[in-house]
């Protein structure tokens, strides 16, 4: 967890991950203490076979975890394919609905200040969730872009005035 691996083949060495270097034991620095006068404590010598079993169990646990994660991701890929976690949902049709509504509002009510998207006048009976042979299109008047460019809201003075009067927390 701290980025250190020990190797004990010929000479004991430490591999430091974040610096990607091998450190020899002679380069280790630490506190120097006086030798202890108490009798040496009995050392815990575990058999090498036990350590190998523990290492294999850890490797098996790690492999099972990776296998379980990959299996979960492969089983839920249809649910996680979109932002709503709905199986087989196509968000591109949602964008078509919003684009149609926006175009309709800019052409029919260009002077409206604010609209409520949950109003019943925005009900669209097009089936956006079905699989169609042709894509659902967005119709846009040919002069709509010109109308938007010539509108008062796109003039630089109006934009600067609006930004100056805007709440600082809502600024872009």
Image (cartoon, rainbow, N blue to C red):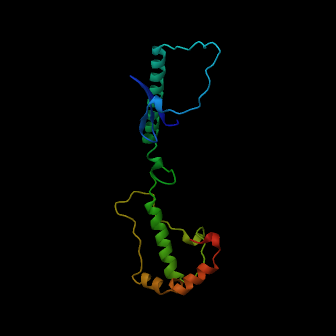
Identify whether 78 is placed above or below 68.
below
Quarter holding residue 138: bottom left
The residue nearer to you, when weighing 64 against 54, is: 54
Q: Residue furthest left?
A: 133
Residue 64 in view: no
Total marks shown come to 0
Residue at the spot x=43%, y=38% of the render? Answer: 70
Is the C terminus in the top left, top right, bottom left or bottom right quadrant? Answer: bottom right
The residue nearer to you, when weighing 153 against 95, is: 153
Residue at the spot x=46%, y=23% of the render? Answer: 55
Residue 26 in view: yes
Residue 8 rendering spot, x and y as whole percentages: 43, 24
The residue nearer to you, when weighing 31 against 93, is: 31
Residue at the spot x=44%, y=47% of the render? Answer: 78
The residue nearer to you, when weighing 150 against 94, is: 150
Residue at the spot x=44%, y=40% of the render? Answer: 75
Residue 170 rendering spot, x and y as whole percentages: 62, 70
Identify whether 83 is placed above or below 23.
below
Residue 42 rendering spot, x and y as whole percentages: 59, 12
């Amino acid at each position: 967890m701290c980025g250190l691996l020990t190797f004990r083949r010929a000479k004991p060495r430490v591999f430091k991950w974040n610096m990607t270097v091998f450190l020899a034991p002679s380069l280790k620095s630490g506190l120097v203490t006086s030798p202890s006068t108490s009798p040496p404590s009995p050392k815990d010598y575990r058999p090498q076979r036990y350590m190998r079993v523990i290492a294999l169990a850890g490797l098996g646990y790690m492999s099972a975890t990776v296998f379980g994660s990959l299996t979960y991701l492969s089983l839920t890929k249809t649910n996680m394919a979109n932002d709503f976690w709905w199986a087989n949902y196509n968000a591109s049709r949602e964008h078509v609905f919003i684009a149609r509504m926006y175009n309709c509002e800019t052409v029919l009510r260009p002077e409206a200040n604010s609209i409520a998207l949950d109003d019943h006048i925005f009900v669209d009976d097009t089936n956006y969730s079905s699989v169609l042979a042709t894509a659902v299109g967005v119709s846009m008047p040919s002069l709509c872009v010109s109308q938007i460019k010539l509108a008062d809201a796109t003039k630089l003075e109006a934009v600067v005035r609006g930004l100056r009067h805007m709440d600082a927390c809502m600024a872009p």
